[in-house]
Amino acid sequence: MAGAGMSAGGEFLAGCRDEAPLLLGVAPFGMIYGIAALSAGVPAWLAQLASAVVFAGAAQLVIVQMLAAGAGALPIALTSGLLNLRHVLYSASMAEYVRHLPRRWRLLLAYLLTDEAYAVAVLRYQRRDHSEPPAPASDLRHWYFLGAGFTLWAGWQLSTAAGLLFGATIPAAWELDFAVPLTFIALLTLLLRERAGQAAALVAGLGALAFAALPYKLGLVAAILLGLLAGVWTVRRLERAR
């Protein structure tokens, strides 16, 4: 855990260190994307470039799978957009912590804002808020955010390259697909510390099961909306009880 009064370099390295354990789930995830991209007929250079520029693991994987299935541009764009709606919530959550930064910093951190980087960085911000909120001029926590985001970015590039280079040699029996849900389960264990988050996750999970039969994966959209409503309701209920 990073301590108070750290330098910019110390914050950066602390972010790298705290993000590193999550790479255990990200590495096979990136390899799956590399393998899926080649299977869909995407050139290796383009698949690697997408990882460097787009840097959106789940969306990249869905796009290549839909390309392999022959889906059109509109369904792919709609699915990718829905899948990335959660980043709006991430951005809203992080805005209060980074709004004092120059635009170049906010743009860089927005680019690096992934599920894994968000989970690590927001916990760091919330932890410090409960103890010693720093003045904006001496607040160096964005370096921690940068370290976490850069570590994830570098891990994603390397694992994509590994999938592109060595995917054909990996035995099919290894079934690396387990890495995708495993990564998100690990993130949930980090974030579900408050009642509102626990209520949202529980309702969304039950909703996903209840609406699993809906076409076009609409059950997931319904489950997300129900989870959001449950989280908001829980927050308001707790506020009234104080």
Image (cartoon, rainbow, N blue to C red):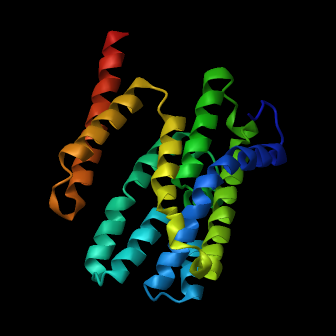
Q: On screen, 46 above or below 150?
A: below
Residue at position x 26%, y 38% from top? 206
Locate the N terminus and report the quarter of the image it occupies: top right
Do we see residue 213 in this rendering?
A: yes
Position of residue 208 measured from the top left corner of the image (x, y, whole percent) = 26, 46
Position of residue 47 measured from the top left corner of the image (x, y, whole percent) = 54, 81
Q: On screen, 160 above or below 87?
A: below
Q: On screen, 153 above or below 6?
A: below
Q: Which residue lies furthest to the top in this view?
A: 242
Q: On screen, 235 above or below 16?
A: above
The foreground one among 146 and 79 is 79
Res 149 → quadrant: bottom right
Do we see residue 56 in this rendering?
A: no
Give the side of residue 115 with respect to residue 125, left or right.
left
Locate the C terminus and report the quarter of the image it occupies: top left
The foreground one among 49 and 168 is 168
Q: Which residue lies furthest to the front in this view?
A: 173
The foreground one among 133 and 222 is 222
Give the side of residue 188 with respect to residue 101, left or right.
left
Give the side of residue 137 with respect to residue 79, left or right.
right
Residue at position x 75%, y 37% from top? 138
Give the side of residue 173 with respect to residue 155, left or right.
left
Residue at position x 64%, y 70% from top? 157
Position of residue 241 measured from the top left corner of the image (x, y, whole percent) = 33, 11
Res 150 → quadrant: bottom right
Position of residue 176 measured from the top left corner of the image (x, y, whole percent) = 52, 63
Residue at position x 58%, y 77% from top? 167
Q: How many labels does the image show?
A: 0
